[in-house]
Amino acid sequence: MKIQHSNSIVISTILAISTKQTSSFSTIAAPPPLPSVLDIPPPPGLPSSVAIDLANDGVAVVPNYACSDTVNLLRFDALRLKHAGAIHTAGTTGDGTNPRKRTRSNSDSNSNNSSPLRKCNHFWLVDRHSESGRSYLGPSYISDLVSTIEDEVEGTSPLSHGDDRSDYELSHRILTKVADEYCGDDDEKDGEHVIHRKETEAAYLYYDKGGYYDWHFDTPSLRKSKEEEQRRDGNNNNEENHRRAFSFLLYLGGHEADPKSGEVRPWDASKDGGELRVFPSISLDEQHRRIVGAPNKKREANVRNEDSGSGLVGDPTDQEEFLDIVPEEGTLVIFKSEAICHQVLATNRERLVVVGWIHGDLK
């Protein structure tokens, strides 16, 4: 079904009614992992500013990327899963099964050392049972969005080097070194920044009131060696030559609707909180060390066993410079996973978002 703008109030009203009936929805068994039937028009192309901002700053923000009708339908899809009991507590690596050991930083005035690093839930949108390659649950819009962003970042360096040519050449040498260490002599190393489309991840994230995510990177501190991957997987196929390169978020706002109009009220950061705090890109040297590891083998072992993702980088909350992005519905954010440390500030209302990670080749 195609929803026109005049029907967006109807969708909002449905959301408002279903929100009030959470108790009855919670008794329904989790639905089978089938694609949603919601028919949403595909997303638009990305503005040229995205490539420029990614190159210069490592992060790009596109306000009003998704229209209100699209947001309403995605919100409806996410909430039907929540009310059906299909969502799970989010972890911090890959499919969320490996929660970190690090607790929240003392720099967060709303945190303490006993609270977890992250407080939110998720629904994984990757169809793990697909026999035709990587496919996604939910509306076809999810797959279309993933493809649009993949097309945009294809060939883009996953390392943040600013607009200085010498830095660009340094990033190329870093990736070449990684290729030498991890890809083997027989693998093609043509210098192109290739993405692994079959490895892209996507999920709905649900932050209830009081939810947050302390500072972190979206990549592990050190890349696991081939031997470790083979021991874990029980095979020798050497497929693990990549890691998360680009992260993206599409904000769906909150879902409290005005009882009279049925409209979902806009996000007000002054009272709703929940901003995405983005810290300046770390240096190329720090990015290099996070990928390849520390020269000190004992330190490398310690960092490898620490599941914080912070690795060889200090607490970024000591910095005075940062960018707070308001999670207004329809806003799209893309950033370089290896270079950008970020956190989600405590939210004072329910907060929904589509998130994903595109893997980049280490060649």
Image (cartoon, rainbow, N blue to C red):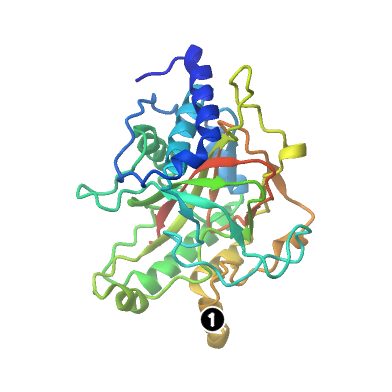
Query: Residue at 36% of width from left, 78% of height from top?
Result: 228
- In the image: residue 119, left or right of residue 239: right
Q: Where is residue 150 in the image (x, y as percent from the top left)?
A: 40, 42
In front here: 209 or 5? 209
Q: Is residue 74 above or below residue 237?
A: above
Residue closer to the observer: 173 or 7? 7
Q: Which residue is drawn at 62% across and 17% down?
A: 261
Pinpoint residue 68: horizontal percent, then vertical percent.
53, 23
Q: Which residue lies furthest to the top in this view?
A: 6
Q: In this view, does 357 lie above or below 143?
A: below
Q: Is residue 65 visible?
A: no
Instruction: Please indicate whether residue 106 sits to the left or right of residue 310 in the image.
Output: right
Q: Tell which of 176 and 305 is nearer to you.
A: 305
Which residue is labeled 1 in the image? 300
x and y, in percent, of residue 279 in the image: 68, 53
Instruction: Using residue 14 as the reference point, say whether residue 284 is left or right of it.
Output: right
Task: Look at the image and tell me in which quarter the C terminus lies.
Answer: bottom left
Which quadrant of the rendered structure holds the N terminus?
top left
Amino acid at dot 1: Glu
